[in-house]
Image (cartoon, rainbow, N blue to C red):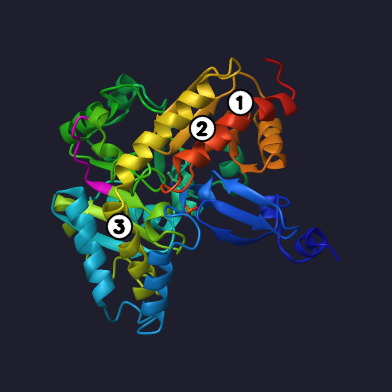
Amino acid sequence: MTWQERYSGHLVNAFGLPRLELVRGSGSQVWDSEGRVYLDLLGGIAVNSLGHAHPAVVDAVHTQLTTLGHVSNFFTSEPQIQLAERLGALVGHPTKVFFSNSGTEANEAALKLTRLTGRTHVVATEGAFHGRTMGALSLTHKPAYREPFEPLPGEVTFVPYGDADALAAAVTDETAAVVLEPIQGEAGVLVPPAGYLAAARQATSDHGALLWLDEVQTGIGRTGAWFAHQLPWADGVVPDVVTLAKGLGGGMPIGATLALGSAAELFQPGNHGTTFGGNPVSCAAALAVLSTIESEGLLEHATTVGAQLRAGLEEHPQVVSTSGAGLLVGVDLGADISAAVTAAAQAAGFIVNNPTPSRLRLAPALTLTRQEAQDFVDAWPTILEAAGVSS
Ligand SMILES: *Cc1c(COP(=O)(O)O)cnc(C)c1O
């Protein structure tokens, strides 16, 4: 039997049929079960921040697992405390952390935290993606994701992303929080206009509401800064809540809900919990990711290589524009051809992603080399041609 038949026979059809069966990865390369090699420009959806099988992550996980693997939150461990300290230092403001295992869980914890303000209304944005569990889904905009599961919990107002006036108009004295992705990832890497985050900070402060930034995709160096809200165009905005996951564990599952300032005191014993969250192995992996980003200068590297990629891809006349920051890159193809381009890229040995019909997303390892970026740029005209684009 083929892997496709075995998969279809035994896994629910939530994802459709996977594109490939992968067997091995090293750096930014992955191999499939037919022995073909690909340059991985998706990184497990912005997760493999140091690429595949990075020795720092492998060693940290191995050492921690052979020392102390899991203890539950009746106990703590040095990696858990250290990771919380490190994340707080990177945020640069007094911060307390709740650890979980995924982005949706980080957001679920944040949503519960907003309820502890005594308010229930949340403002979210059109195009937003915050996860698939019921609470996070209530803040996710896409009708196809929501409708089969309605009614969803909560009182949520959606406003157009990037429209500061619409956002300000939706926030009232009853609003618990505004939740925003600093750059919308699943919507196709959409960067808001300058001043948008500052306007959101102003609107929330004016009404005593929390500003919650979902940095599940944009956090941990992805954009060339530790957090997207620390990029120059974010105007030094200080949020109340930041959620993280994807790149944090370098491939190990971990989520984190960061609460800053007075928001850090909202959770009290009994309000929330998790069995696996904050386990020593995932925390040790995350510590290895943070120290490697620092020691290898990967923030700067992501900025440089991201700019190189974008400049190279933009040279083709089919590309209307590129977007993003660092190594979170969106490509506007100007027509509904992203599925064909993704398939042609794969046939040419490159893994990319098509979050919308007309846009590609690249979220490779922060360790992607200049040469690897150049290999994709060099193949780009041929890929577009194979996808039916004439130049
Ligand atoms: C991926 C993502 C999530 C959900 O994370 P999971 O780990 O898939 O649950 C939430 N928010 C944003 C911005 C994301 O990109």
Please tell me whether mark 1 sits on a helix, a strand or a loop.
loop
* Magenta span of residues: 235-241
In percent of width and height, residue 185 lies at 46, 38
Q: Where, quadrant-wise, is the C terminus in this rendering?
A: top right
Q: Quadrant of residue 64?
A: bottom left
SS of the residue at dot 2? loop
Horizontal side, residue 53 vs residue 6: left or right: left
At 45% from the left edge and 39% from the top edge, which residue is drawn?
370
Q: Quadrant of residue 284?
A: bottom left
Task: Please give the name of the residue rendered at 32% of the width and 57% of the height, measured from the top-left corner.
Answer: 292
Q: Gap between marks 2 and 1, in whole Å?
A: 9 Å
Q: Amino acid at mark 3?
A: Leu
Dividing the picture into quadrants, the one containing residue 104 is bottom left
**Secondary structure that dominates the magenta span:** loop
Q: For the N terminus, which image quadrant? A: bottom right
User: Which numbered disc covers residue 290?
Assistant: 3
Residue 33: percent from left, percent from top: 72, 60
Mark 1 and mark 3: Cα distance apart in space: 34 Å
Query: Is residue 237 within the magenta segment?
Result: yes
Does any portion of residue 80 appear in the rendered image?
yes
Q: Which mark is residue 358?
A: 1
Q: Is residue 126 visible?
A: no
Q: Are marks 2 and 1 in contact (CB under 8 Å)?
A: yes
- Mark 2 or 3, which is nearer the eye? 3
- Dot 2 alpha-carbon crowd within 10 angstroms: few under 14, some 14 to 19, many 20 or more: many
239 to 285, vertically: above or below: above
The residue singled out by tag 2 in the image is 188
Q: Residues within 10 Å of mark 1 (few under 14, many from 20)?
A: some
